[in-house]
Amino acid sequence: MYAVNWMTPPQAMVFSQRACFSRSRSTALSIFCFRSSLDKVSQLNVKCYSTSSYGEFDSVSRRRSRGPVMAAKKASEGTKQEDGRYKHTIDLPKTNFSMRANARVREPEIQKLWDDSQVFKRIVDRNNGESFILHDGPPYANGDLHIGHALNKILKDIINRYKLLQNYKVHYVPGWDCHGLPIELKVLQSMDQDTRKELTPLKLRTKAAKFAKDTVKSQMKSFKRYGVWGEWNNPYLTLNPEYEAAQIEVFGQMAIQGYIYRGRKPVHWSPSSRTALAEAELEYPEGHVSKSIYAIFKLVSAPPSAYGLLEEFFPHLCLAVWTTTPWTIPANAAVAVNSKLQYAVVEMCSSNKDPSTSEGSGRQKLGNVLNGQDKPFLIVAADLVPTLESKWGMKLAVKTTLLGSDLENCRYVHPIDNRECPVVIGGDYITTESGTGLVHTAPGHGQEDYATGLKYGLPIFSPVDDDGRFTEEAGQFCGLDVLGDGNDAIVKYLDEHMSIIMEEPYKHKYPYDWRSKKPTIFRATEQWFASVEGFRQAAFDAIDQVAWIPEQAENRISAMISTRSDWCISRQRIWGVPIPVFYNVHSKEPLMDEETIDHIKNLIAKKGSDVWWYMTVEELLPDKYRSMASEYQKGTDTMDVWFDSGSSWAAVLAKRDGLSCPADLYLEGTDQHRGWFQSSLLTSIATRGKAPYSCVITHGFVLDEKGLKMSKSLGNVVDPNIVIEGGKNSKEATGYGADVLRLWVSSVDYTGDVMIGPQILRQMSDIYRKLRGTLRYLLSNLHDWDPENAVSYSNLPMIDQHALFQLGNVVKSIKDSYENYQFYKIFQILQRFAIVDLSNFYFDVAKDRLYVGGTASFTRRSCQTVLAAHLLSIVRVIAPILPHLAEDVWQSLPFEHTTEDGFVAKFVFESRWPELDERWFSMATEDVDFWAKILELRTEVNKVLEIARSGKLIGSSLDAKIYLHSADADMASRLHGMCIARNDADMLHRIFITSQVEILSSLESELMENIPYKGDYLIGGKSRIWIGVSRAEGSKCERCWNYSPQVGSFSEHPTLCSRCYNVIGAQLLPAVAAVS
């Protein structure tokens, strides 16, 4: 066995798996020939296993015994085959189950069957085990689904369907996030300017609700086409009144406990969307370039503790700062230093750079201050002196050093408005990794600046409006865009006033609005916040009690909780749930208490959140305050959509019958550690003190086959709808059906990023087709099966007991993988066992007794007993992953399946998980080891047969007789026992698919001369076995094509061997053979 890592380059991944043996060239058997060559393998991040090393002997498999089936096939087609007198005695496979999936037609038919029979509800109602609740994270209702949606929903469905088979009462309520800016923007973009002018808030909300509901219908149709089961007739929508009321209730509980407050703080602000944003609404695209500057602020005084060190450098001493946001300089209120760092006063000496050559080059540009005769002394971090010398292209002579703590309370002149500002002590965010070691501090434009400002009572100044333009407070810069011409104007002003040493572009990660795809700013505004500090430790404690898959996800969310600031929950938009607050028209003081919140919650529960816009203040206030209505006005902020979805545990799990909180499982993408996982955790901890989930699974993002992010510009987007239904050009975009897409989901290790593309999908389709072929083989050879004819385990031949031993272990392994949510391991097991191992050995050997062993013979019935066990097991273990295929097989079963409690399962998911017979695992260890050696020996025998075929000694393997010799007495004895086995199925020549096998006690020279092809082979790494091949003895049986000395011994059937003679005698009536 060897593994091939599919992450390697395509040119390094050409390999073939073990080819099946005894394949017929006939049409009759071609449908059951499972060639396992995977051609060229691309970058699937799964492992594919080959179970043999004899791929080079693939031709053996094409030249094995095919006589009886070929003869019957030709006879059934009307082809003259001698007299065809035994054609009706062959038990050919029969089934209506098509080899061609025709998924685009058949899958919707199966889904209709499920819907018409309410199968999901039937199974949930019948199951009497524990409840299992997978709580659905709501996708956003603003567009078509992408491949990431498919990965997410299919993973959930695999889990739910497995739990159904395990007798759980599965509760899965699909949900949608229906409020927020993206939907509002979609509505606005659909209108012309004149229509927008006439748009009232209520009209906008009505249009937004319609858009969201229409999108829900569209997305729901796609999810159902993926084969996802759920309560589609009763999903949860965050715009439903009962949901909005539950959300208001959560908000109210947090407010009453003191976790909700209004404050003026810097928040992420999107000028393009004109609203505050949460961290989860940001993205950080590569390639953003900011205009950075090294600026200087003139020092004018120092406290007594530092004056003695600095006195000689006045009045030409400056603080050097570095910033990537020059537009925030007007709001500068302080310069912060690290009290523990060493700082140096440096003198700027000769410059090696020519400012004129760099101007306008788009690279570094030196400031005008360097052109003057009297260059100022600068204060910078001592450790950064060499770096700054290299950066600025000049020598910096250190004059003296002092600690950062010595600089506290020094004062400098603001470079724009000439007011005096202090030097303050900042936090650990001030380092020597970049910049100058001194930080320009604007409390109105940064979180760390804000914290430092609170410590020193600095003004929170933010002269920027909702559109991202300077206000009148910015003086001469009023009206300029802070991210555009305003930024340029600040830099120009500072340089003209000798306050810039260098200007240069700086490439870094910068927050963008995830909806408008445009840069954001930090800006201090009046907003509503949830105080995370009040319950941060409780959140850590809850995280520790949750199972996280993969394990490192716990570290990820813990780190995010530990560093997150208070949650800004207010938005300046119309389409959302209102923050239920009233403001005094004179004092602007907010009115929000338990009575007002409860009253609004009840109104919203009955009429929806539109009441906030069409009801008067008097109607919205409870009786206690109604007489004061004229003194108040409604607030205009709506809630952050993460508060919407983060309240789903309260609106769905805690409110719906049959559901409860915490849910057993949340499953979403890794980006939800800062999104839904976190918002759900925070709201639940704040109000209930515990997490809303017991287990959390995260999956990665979907990339193309080359590992690149999908984008329309690259043309590498994989549309799940096209994967299933096909594109306009069927040759370029084949429709594979939902099950192939689901098979891909099962094949990847979703805990990291996963890949998909045309080549990968073709491979999935090929594997699906082979698995379908395996199931068709099983169905077709059970066409006359009656469970009453099952052979008891103790009476089964050893080969059959070994097959059940392997099956039992496979089912157990698959169950373990389902329980651990490791679906890619199931994919590997199925590929290796159901597609490769079964067809290469057991199916191959079984054909003889199935087709020519006799309709009601013991050997055929024992084989059918094993095949039925395999069919009923495989079809159920694949059902969570490939439900359409499993149901298609189940509806084609030629017999009824009754569960242990006497229930006739009409649908595959009614059959429950396979119950394994403990006797299947009772095979002794030495017997298991022996059969492993037999399989390896069979491989070596096939090699010698191929050599004999190449030498023209034989054609079919049935033309051969095998000779074996082993010096190992125990091995020789067991091999001899298989040559005289009481059961024909265990005979060694049946396993080798040859006519005879003889075990030699010694290698006599005379005998050796009559065996033309021979050689020594190592079995099991230590047992050396000699193998020889000669022509088979006797004549060829007309019916089974085995050679036997007994052919010609029966006068009424002179062309038959003894086995076929007995079969013919037992069959009183001819069986009509046909191939469906």
Image (spheres, rainbow, N blue to C red):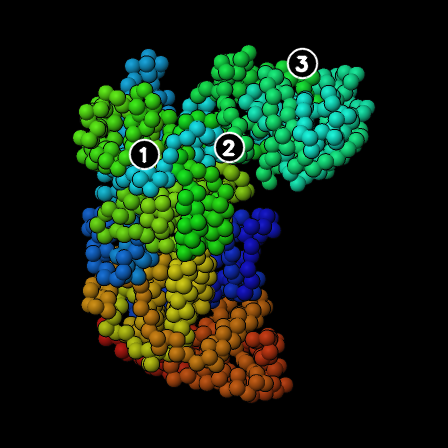
Q: Which mark is residue 496?
A: 3
Mark 1 and mark 3 lie on one chain; the one further toward the N terminus is: 1
Nearer to me, 95 or 228? 228
Measured in 3D between alpha carbons, the distance from the residue under mark 1 to the one under mark 2, in whole angstroms, is 38 Å
Count of labels shown?
A: 3
Residue type pointed to by label 1: Cys
Q: Position of residue 84 (x, y in %)?
A: 33, 67
- Distance Cα–Cα, label 2 vs label 3: 33 Å
* Element on which disc 2 rests: helix
Q: Quadrant of the N terminus?
A: bottom right
Q: Position of residue 917 (x, y in %)?
A: 33, 73
Confirm whether residue 636 shows in the render: no
Q: Nearer the viewer, residue 137 or 723?
A: 137
User: Label 1 to label 3, Cα distance in Å?
Assistant: 51 Å
The residue sitting at 57% across, 85% down in the picture is 968
Q: Which residue is mark 2?
A: 454
How many neighbours does mark 1 have within 10 angstroms: few (below 14), some (14-19), or many (20 or more)? many
Which badge, 2 or 3, comes first in the chain's sequence?
Answer: 2
Q: Nearer the viewer, mark 2 or mark 3?
A: 2
Callout in the foreground (1, 3): 3
Quadrant in the rendering for residue 258: top left
* Picture coordinates of residue 322, whole percent (x, y): 64, 28
The reply to whether discs 1 and 3 touch (Cβ–Cβ < 8 Å) is no
Looking at the rendered structure, which numbered label has been put on residue 178? 1
Residue at 57%, 48% in the rendered image: 10
**What amino acid does circle 3 point to?**
Glu
